[in-house]
Image: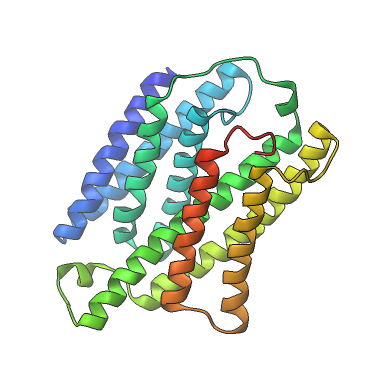
Amino acid sequence: MTHMFFFLTVALYGCAVAAYLACLIRTSPLFTLWSGRLLAAGFTAHLLSTIHLASKVKYLPLTNMQESLSFFSLAIVGGFIFFERKYKVTSLGSFIAPVALMMLIASSSLHPEVRQLHPVLQSNWFWFHALLAFASYACFTIAAGVAVMYLTQRYFLKTKHFGALFQKLPSLETMDDISYRCLTVGFPLLTVAIISGSIWSEQATGSYWIWDNKQTWSLIIWFIYAALLHGRLTIGWRGKRAAILSIVGFIIVLFTFLSMKHSITW
């Protein structure tokens, strides 16, 4: 059942990506309608797959790379659906849905690891920490997608290239607002995730902070987004500078996630 829902999710996400990309090529209410419906259906199938796997293994499936990539994809799609419905920005799906699909495909290429849960992970603090971390990472992923759109639209305006793609992208003001909302949601989530991770670390190792690679890079990510948020609130950082820093932050998030997944201070 888990595999059936999983492969259905891949198929629905794939169709949604095709529909979103078609929206960039040709303006069509049909493409706009079905891209959202296909992604929502894929999200439902993805959620059912995750729930079924959790019921089978008796824990939330995010303790290895395969499970985590799938859960990261689920969090990204869930966050995107929220922002798409709030801001009516269908074109954002052309930048976000492919990322979620690639993560899911990467997850399917890894060997499944169904095993007994390690005692270190049998802590409510771990699950609380992990869920908040994924939620914050999803916000930062969406912010990075918006930043790419922002820089693209800014280039069109600067070069006075008002083609078809320019007409389909949101205004700079709308994208800047979405980016700010992602930051104001993602940064507090990351902050609480790091705090709860420290409490979990104390339970697992006897120390709140052991300065391993995962904790160090998590702190670097925190400082990047803290600087971005502080800059926006105090000296009005917006536009190109904020967009570039948002992309840099996401690249470091991805590097940390992919290269250090098995650290004890996940």
Q: In the shown orientation, is residue 56 left or right of residue 203?
A: left
Q: Residue at the spot x=43%, y=46% of the render?
A: 77
Q: Which color scheme does this rendered protein use?
A: rainbow
Give 81 or 198, whichever is nearer the viewer. Answer: 198
Q: Quadrant of residue 90?
A: bottom left
Residue 166 lies, in percent from the top left, at 22, 72
In this rendering, the answer to whether 208 lies above or below 105 is below
Quadrant where the image shows the N terminus? top left
Residue 172 lies, in percent from the top left, at 36, 76
Q: In the shown orientation, is residue 108 left or right of residue 51?
A: left
Q: Residue at the spot x=25%, y=81% of the render?
A: 157
Residue 25 lies, in percent from the top left, at 15, 58
Residue 172 visible in the picture: yes
Quadrant where the image shows the C terminus? top right
Q: How many marks overall?
A: 0
Q: Residue at the spot x=50%, y=44% of the render?
A: 75
In this rendering, the answer to whether 61 lies above or below 213 is above
Residue 4 lies, in percent from the top left, at 37, 20
Give 85 or 257, whichever is nearer the viewer. Answer: 257
Residue ranking furthest to the right: 206
Give 244 or 75, whichever is nearer the viewer. Answer: 244
Q: Quadrant of residue 14?
A: top left
